[in-house]
Image (cartoon, rainbow, N blue to C red):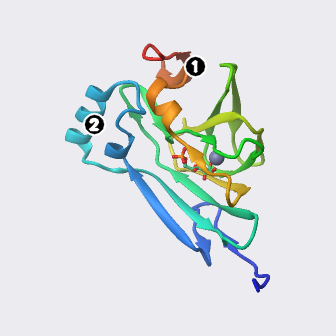
Amino acid sequence: MLLPEGVAIDGATGTVTPSTGRYEKRLSDLRGFFHDDAALDRAIATDGDRVAYEVIDYRHEDSDLSFGTTIMMPGTVGGEYIITRGHFHLRKECGEAYYTQSGEGLLLLESRDGEVKTVEMKPGVCAFIPPEWAHRSINTGKDKLVFVWFCATDAGHDYGIIKDRGMRKLVVERNGKPTLVDNPNHA
Ligand code: F6R
Ligand code: ZN
C-alpha cells in the first residue's frame, strides 16, 4: 500500500525530494523539434551540447496521479527560444496542469484541428491544459523557467505528430521580445 508523504519542491531550482525519477534533454536531443537544424548544429559547435531541460518526477504506478517539475534553461537556437519537445497525451481524456514557480515563458498549445493558443507562464499562474491539446513550454526569459506539472500517471505521450509536422507557430526573439510567428516548416 502506498503511504502519504510530503514532497518538497524547490520553486527556484525545481528539485523534488523525494523523487522517483529524472531525465534531461540536451540540445542534440531536440534535433527535428527546433525549426532550424543548421542553427542547432552551430549552437552545439559553439556552446557544446548543453542541457536544454530536465524533468524530475514523483510517480507511482499504483496511483492515478503523478507530478513533478520541469526545469528549462534560457537561450535561443536560430532565434527560437529553448523549447520542450511538445506532445499530445495518448489517453485522450487526460489533461494536465502546469504551475509556474520561477522564470518566465510561454505555453504553446495546439488542438487536433489546428487551433493555436498560448498561456503566459509566470509565477502564480497555473495553466490548464485540456485533453486533446498538444503542449510545448518555451523559456522566453533570461533565467531558468521552473514549473510543476500534475498529470495522470498513465496519460502517455505522443511525440510523433509534433516531430513529423511541427507546430503551426514558433516563438522567436524579435527586437529582444518573444514573438509568435508562423512555422515555415509546418507540414
Ligand atoms: C507530462 C508533461 C511534462 C513534459 C515535460 C517535458 O505530460 O507534459 O512533464 O513531459 O515538460 O516536455 P516534453 O515531454 O514535451 O519533452
Ligand atoms: Zn503533457
* Label number found at residue 99: none
What residue sits right under mark 2 in the picture?
A: 43
Residue 125 vs 134, above or below: the answer is below
Camera-side residue of 31 and 14:
31
Mark yes or no: residue 176 visible: no
> Compared with residue 115, is residue 150 higher up or lower down, i.e. above or below?
below
Q: Position of residue 140 (x, y in %)?
A: 54, 35
Report x, y in % for residue 87: 58, 39
Amino acid carrying label 2: it is: Ala
Q: Earlier in the sequence, mark 1 or mark 2?
A: 2
Residue, disc 1? 180
The residue under the point 75% across, 83% down is 2
Q: Residues within 10 Å of mark 2 (few under 14, many from 20)?
A: some
Q: Position of residue 79 (x, y in %)?
A: 40, 25
Task: Classify mark 2: helix, strand or loop.
Answer: helix
The residue under the point 49% across, 25% down is 166
Question: Mark 2 near ligand 1 (CB under 8 Å)?
Answer: no
Q: Is mark 1 within 8 Å of ligand 1?
A: no
Total numbered labels:
2
Do the numbered discs 1 and 2 sit on residues whose CB atoms are within 8 Å?
no
Q: How far apart, in angstroms, are the residues tagged by discs 1 and 2?
A: 22 Å
